[in-house]
């Protein structure tokens, strides 16, 4: 994985993701309990927050992610929090353990963008679930695209220990896909400054111990509910529910699919 968000910025991920983690965990845990799910697989688990939080609630969780840095961080955090979900390095396209699971999660808009890749993902997820097992994923709805926001620069910032993290994001739409360019700037809060002389204050050094800059690029597909239903049917799932949580001025959509046998 070449993306800075899954490499150099792994330690910042849960800070900058901007989720209402508590509400999301409550929603997922309620869905799992309502359907009698005890074991779950988090596909594209990232830094493992969901697997760790759901393990604390009594579920048996396994997280899989293609990023070695993500899995390393997830294992470290689990050890610090004294919980024991299982974390595996691998791809959700071809992960094939000996066991089956009551449910699978795929969050942070991690479902594939292209039709053929989405089909491949759903087909493999089907093979991982027990009969009537659940797949829960979040997605963006085409009907909720805010066209006036596309192309604008959005800035957010966070304080972390001795650092300030700033993100500047600009997105562009092509068909039903949003391409996002995010610049992350990590500032050290160190008060130690060197007073420049008249010459050096006009010359910016290529490297600065107090500032780090990373450029992260991503793409997210927007789906219609008809597309979600069609994808589900082609891979032998059926759509059970479409819960929604607030997300600032937007909304976070979830699809709950059930494996049809």
Image (cartoon, rainbow, N blue to C red):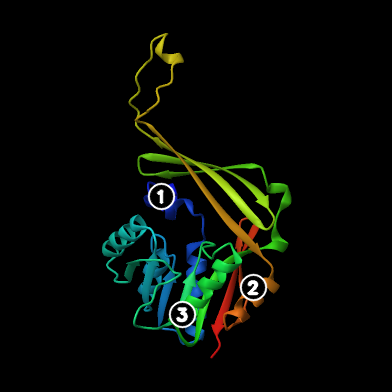
Q: Residue reaching furthest front? A: 116
Q: Residue at x 70, y 57 (%)?
A: 145
Between disc 3 and disc 2, the foreground one is 2
Q: In front: mark 3 or mark 1?
A: 3
Query: Residue 161: where, in percent of width, then height?
Result: 36, 44
Secondary structure category for the residue under label 3: strand
Left or right: residue 246 versus residue 42 is right
Q: Which residue is more in the foreground, 53 or 225?
A: 225
Q: CA distance from mark 1 to mark 2?
A: 32 Å
The single residue placed furthest to the top in the displayed view is 198
The residue that mark 1 highlights is 12
Where's residue 4, x and y in %? 43, 47
**Relative depth, front residue between 196 and 72:** 72
- Category of crowding for the residue at label 2, using alpha-carbon neighbours closer than 10 angstroms: few (below 14), some (14–19), many (at least 20): some
Q: Which residue is mark 2?
A: 228
Give above or below for 224 relative to 208.
below
SS under mark 1: helix
Q: Name which residue lies at 44% across and 50% down.
A: 5
Instruction: Estimate how packed mark 3 is, as few (under 14), some (14 to 19) or many (20 or more) residues with alpha carbons within 10 Å.
Output: many
Q: Is residue 8 visible?
A: yes
Please give the residue where the numbered disc 3 appears in the rendered image: 103
Q: Horizontal and vertical percent for residue 142?
A: 70, 62
Give the x, y percent position of residue 216.
49, 46
**Which tag is nearer the camera, tag 1 or tag 2?**
2
Relative placement, left or right, of 158 versus 63 is right
Q: CA distance from mark 3 to mark 1?
A: 28 Å
Residue 27 in view, yes or no: no
């Amino acid at each position: 994985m070449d993306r800075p968000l899954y490499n150099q910025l792994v330690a910042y991920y849960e800070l900058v993701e901007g989720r209402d983690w508590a509400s999301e965990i409550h929603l997922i845990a309620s869905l799992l309990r309502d359907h009698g799910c005890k074991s779950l697989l988090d596909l594209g688990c990232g830094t493992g927050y969901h697997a760790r939080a759901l393990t604390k609630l009594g579920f048996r969780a396994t997280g899989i992610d293609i990023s070695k840095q993500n899995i390393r961080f997830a294992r470290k955090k689990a050890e610090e929090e004294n919980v024991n979900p299982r974390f595996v390095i691998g791809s959700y396209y071809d992960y094939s353990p000996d066991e089956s699971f009551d449910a699978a999660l795929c969050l942070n808009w991690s479902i594939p963008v292209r039709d053929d890749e989405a089909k491949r993902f759903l087909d493999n997820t089907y093979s991982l679930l027990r009969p009537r097992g659940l797949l829960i994923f979040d997605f963006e709805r085409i009907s909720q695209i805010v066209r006036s926001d596309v192309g604008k620069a959005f800035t957010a910032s966070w304080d972390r220990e001795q650092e300030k993290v700033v993100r500047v994001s600009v997105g562009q739409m092509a068909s039903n896909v949003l391409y996002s360019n995010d610049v992350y700037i990590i500032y050290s809060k160190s008060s130690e400054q060197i007073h420049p002389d008249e010459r050096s204050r006009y010359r910016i050094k290529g490297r600065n111990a107090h500032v780090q800059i990373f450029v992260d690029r991503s793409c997210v597909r927007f789906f219609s509910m008809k597309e979600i239903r069609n994808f589900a049917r082609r891979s032998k799932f059926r759509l059970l529910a479409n819960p929604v949580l607030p997300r600032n001025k937007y909304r976070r959509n979830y699809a709950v699919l059930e494996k049809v046998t």
